[in-house]
Image (tube, grey):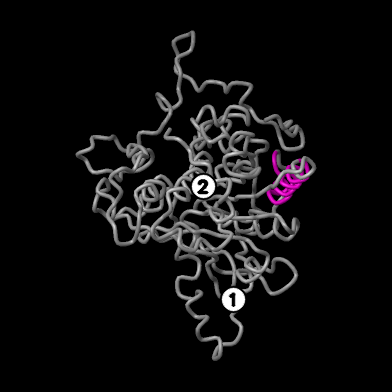
């Protein structure tokens, strides 16, 4: 809750307008605050998601658009959610997709008047949910690259399927995630441009969410030329080939990838066949089948934090809360963990066991009281009905939120 700096004169630099040169090492405090802000939006997609397989609402968001930031303590950031995003896939996927047809995958929001003045423009944010599993399933997501766009760009088949799939038989995906996002982003851009405001689009996501962030950035930059589009992703995998990376660069998309050295997911797909092979272009020719990362990288080291156990914890290394803790404590590659870091370390043990035992923070502490059961008027323990206000309607029935700032 420390005072926020006015970055209105420097926002393009903070948002990667010059490739984040001289801002990452040492990490500029203004940029650190913005990375954490967008990371907390991505974390909200986990904290508000109903993972409970016994719940009739499993796969949905536990709160409606008007209450989610209030419930999660994110009103401090000065944004308002305008639309939820739902996704599905026509292929068999692992258990992180809890519902058989559609799942809540994130939200679209926009900065309010006060935050817009502080950051120097009206900022539209798209936050994508990922998977908490560092999963072996990424190994399966490297079998096929599908074309995207009109040139040689190709992206991983399953990522594109999640982004583009739709079905009239589903409750929430009569339109695809792609169509939902682009319709709302275009509406917001047109609304604020008509008011003479400068507008930016910032897309964030962790893990799979980072992959979906790249796909939506590609589509937004293609459809809305001139719009400043930037990505801040955490623990994201590779998504496409070299041509895909080059097209994003040519369209002016600015990408900052936050990566933990010990996390396995950013090494996939393409554990062997990746951008490192580009140096052999003269021998191999155009490598349109090779996966490559996009943009600038902020690399963090789990072992730099004195609060974390010196144990091999694959899931813990990949957790978004681990990333946010490391960002908060990072100053430079040659300095120690910041002694004045402010983010609550207890958050590290929300859904894993990362903190040293001396801190006495229970592991896996983030769960509903009594695992979601309540004692009713008859003295029986039951799953309660969700507040009617928090039961979201299918996409076809929802009304776009009126923008009042």
Q: Nearer the viewer, residue 205 or 36?
A: 36
Which quarter of the figure is the C terminus placed in? Answer: top right
- In the rendered structure, which segment of residues is drawn in magenta? 172-191
Evaluate whether residue 131 shows in this view: yes
Residue at left offset 48%, top offset 38%: 4
* Viewer-nearest of discs 1 and 2: 1
State the residue in front, 11 or 243: 11
Does the magenta portion include 127? no
State the mark number for residue 149.
none
Q: List x then y, in percent, for residue 123.
A: 63, 44
Query: Any magenta on residue 190?
Result: yes
Q: Looking at this view, name the residue that lies furthest to the bottom.
A: 283
Relative to 390, is 273 above or below?
below
Q: Farthest residue in the left direction?
A: 358
Q: What residue is at 37 percent from the left and 58 percent from the top? A: 300
Q: Is there a contact, CB below 8 Å, between mark 1 and mark 2?
A: no
Tell me the SS state at disc 1.
Answer: loop
Hey, which residue is sitting farthest front in the picture? 9
User: Percent position (x, y) of residue 268?
Assistant: 48, 65
What residue did someone put label 1 on? 289
Front residue of this view, candidates 19 and 256: 19
- How far apart in space, not on screen, are marks 1 and 2 (Cα)? 27 Å
Given residues 263 and 113, the one toward you in this image is 113
What residue would you read off at disc 2?
Answer: 96
């Amino acid at each position: 809750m420390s005072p926020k700096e006015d970055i209105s004169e420097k926002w393009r630099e903070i948002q990667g307008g010059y490739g984040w040169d001289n801002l990452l090492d040492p990490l500029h405090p203004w940029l650190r605050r913005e990375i954490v802000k967008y990371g907390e939006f991505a974390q909200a997609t986990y904290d508000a998601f109903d993972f409970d397989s016994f719940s009739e609402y499993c796969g949905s968001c536990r709160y409606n658009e008007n209450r989610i930031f209030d419930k999660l303590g994110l009103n401090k950031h000065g944004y308002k959610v305008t639309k939820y995003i739902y996704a599905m896939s026509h292929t068999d996927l692992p258990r992180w997709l809890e519902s058989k047809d559609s799942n809540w995958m994130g939200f679209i929001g926009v900065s309010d008047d006060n935050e817009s003045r502080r950051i120097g423009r009206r900022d539209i944010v798209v936050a994508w949910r990922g998977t908490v599993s560092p999963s072996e399933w990424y190994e399966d997501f490297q079998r096929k690259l599908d074309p995207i766009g009109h040139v040689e760009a190709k992206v991983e088949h399953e990522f594109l399927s999640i982004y583009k799939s739709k079905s009239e038989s589903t409750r929430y995906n009569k339109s695809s995630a792609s169509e939902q996002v682009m319709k709302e982003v275009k509406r917001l851009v047109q609304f604020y441009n008509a008011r003479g405001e400068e507008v930016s689009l910032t897309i964030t996501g962790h893990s799979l969410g980072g992959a979906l962030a790249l796909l939506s950035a590609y589509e937004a930059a293609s459809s809305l030329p001139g719009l400043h589009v930037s990505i801040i992703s955490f623990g994201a995998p590779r998504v496409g080939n070299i041509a895909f990376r080059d097209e994003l660069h040519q369209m002016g998309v600015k990408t900052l990838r936050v990566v933990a050295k010990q996390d396995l997911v950013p090494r996939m797909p393409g554990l062997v066949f990746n951008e490192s092979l580009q140096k052999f272009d003269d021998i191999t020719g155009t490598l349109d089948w090779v996966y490559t990362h996009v943009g600038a990288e902020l690399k963090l080291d789990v072992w730099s934090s004195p609060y974390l156990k010196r144990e091999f914890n694959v899931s813990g290394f990949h957790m978004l809360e681990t990333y946010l803790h490391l960002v908060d404590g990072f100053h430079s590659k040659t300095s120690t963990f910041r002694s004045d870091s402010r983010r609550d370390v207890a958050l590290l043990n929300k859904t894993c066991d990362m903190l040293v035992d001396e801190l006495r923070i229970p592991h896996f502490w983030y769960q509903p009281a009594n695992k979601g059961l309540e004692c009713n008027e008859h003295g029986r323990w039951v799953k309660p009905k969700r507040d009617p206000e928090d039961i979201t309607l299918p996409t076809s029935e929802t009304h776009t939120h009126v923008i009042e700032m």
